[in-house]
Amino acid sequence: MRAHQLIELISPELGDEIDLSISLAPRKSKLWGKIARRLWAARQPEDAIFFVTKSALPVLRPEVAAILKKRGGTICADYVDGDLDRLLSPAADLHIASAYQSERQLVDLIAERNAGGPRFSSKVHTILHGPDIRLANQAVRAQQDTFRMVYFGDPLNCQMSEALRDKIDVLNAAHAEDFEATFEALGDYSAHYCVRPDAQGSRVTKPFTKGMIAAACGAVPLVNRSVPDAEALLGADYPYFTEDDSDTAVEAAFQKMAAEFGRPNWTQALSATQGMAARVSAPAIAERFRELVKIARGSVFSL
């Protein structure tokens, strides 16, 4: 989503306004890899903005960053759901957060690291991580005739009580081929199960993509309030939060949803999910990308 799909999503919105392309940097660690990375950096366009994805961050060695910057490049590091304590890059002119919670964590971490003197750029910009583009394009629309709930994801990551296992279907989307085979079935479900274990306080934030998948389909998510960004995206008064991840709380919220299907609280929840979907729509993400370019053009930060 943060490379190929991001470009595919926003290119129609940007047209010729911003030239977007992907450049794969060599990642080998031995001598030839070092030489190849330097050659790659020297061949990049001058005065370019480099949106460095999490998987490409290991390539961003000081010598590579120095070459890109010498050629007028601006480096934007995107950490997505990585460990910020480990990944925060001194080479970045701009740090990209994929969630509002990540933005707060980045601001705090940079302040901590810079307490003894400026080492890291303080510029942080949020581009929310949205759903898979096949859902962002609204290829699947949830039925709203009956209450049916689904968990869509890796079954190994699903925290669900035995009492709910007979009431909630599970669609395996652990791998790309699983997603391809099952995502169209999402249209059969009016609600999505998005409960996660309560956060443990680390600086690793998983974007609220399960909720965004539900919103992209026009379904209502059941989620614990502690899930990063859930309250910020759905609103504090969203009716189908659980206050914790205990079986008792989750089962009660499930029963509440089932009882209120089609009623005013359900309508309020649908409206909230529509608002969330709008925040990760192609026009909204394209606008955040335009803002990134404006900020990056004003970034001047030396190693």
Image: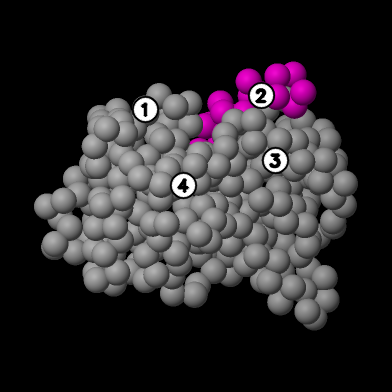
Looking at the image, do the residues carrying marks 3 and 4 touch, with CB atoms under 8 Å apart?
no
Residue identified by numbered label 2: 13
Judge the density around disc 4: few (<14), some (14-19), many (≥20) Cα neighbours within 10 Å.
some
Instruction: Point out the tag, 3 or 4, that comes first from the N-terminus.
Output: 4
What residue is disc 3 on? Answer: 288
Residue type marked 2? Glu
Determine which residue is flagged by label 1. 140
Could you tell which of marks 2 and 4 lies nearer the N-terminus? 2
Say the numbered circle drawn on residue 280.
none
Residue density around tag 2, few if under 14, some if 14–19, many if 20 or more, within 10 Å: some
Mark whose residue sits in front, 3 or 1: 1
The answer to whether residue 245 is visible is yes
Using the image, determine if residue 47 lies above or below residue 54.
Answer: above
Identify the magenta region.
Answer: 1-18
Marks 3 and 4 sit apart, C-alpha to C-alpha, by 27 Å
**How far apart, in angstroms, are the residues tagged by discs 3 and 2?**
12 Å
Of the numbered discs 2 and 1, the one sitting upstream in the chain is: 2
- Which residue is disc 4 drawn over? 268
> Which amino acid type corresponds to the residue marked 1 in the rendered image?
Val
